[in-house]
Amino acid sequence: MGNTHQDPAAFASLLHDVETKLFEVLPDESRVYPGHGKGITLGDERPRLGEWRERGW
């Protein structure tokens, strides 16, 4: 999840897209390459969805 500069509407839109276009359709083994750092799998990040939602950015 990227920084949405504390814009709740932008964050909600981004989180919705990440959940529905990535996590709901791709398997946990799918690799994601962020703009920085090393690649990860959706399975690595799935447990963080609740944390992202609670954090709000």
Image (cartoon, rainbow, N blue to C red):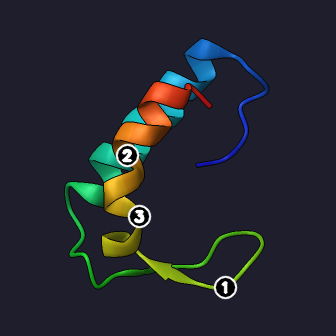
Residue at the location (41% across, 64% down)? 45
Which of the two labelled residues, at mark 2 and mark 1, occupies the earlier sequence position? 1
Residue 6 drawn at (x, y percent):
73, 20
- Relative vertical location of residue 42 with respect to residue 22 in this rendering, above or below: below
Compute the Cα span from label 2 to label 1: 19 Å
Left or right: where 39 falls relative to 49 = right
Can you identify the residue that label 1 sits on?
A: 38
Q: Amino acid at mark 2?
A: Leu
Which of the two labelled residues, at mark 3 and mark 1, occupies the earlier sequence position? 1
Q: Amino acid at mark 3?
A: Glu
- Relative vertical location of residue 26 with respect to residue 7 in this rendering, above or below: below
Can you identify the residue that label 3 sits on?
A: 45
Determine the secondary structure under disc 3.
helix
Residue at the location (21% across, 75% down)? 27
Left or right: where 28 falls relative to 1 = left
Q: Are marks 2 and 3 in contact (CB under 8 Å)?
A: yes
Q: Nearer the viewer, residue 46 or 4?
A: 46
Residue 46 drawn at (x, y percent):
32, 59
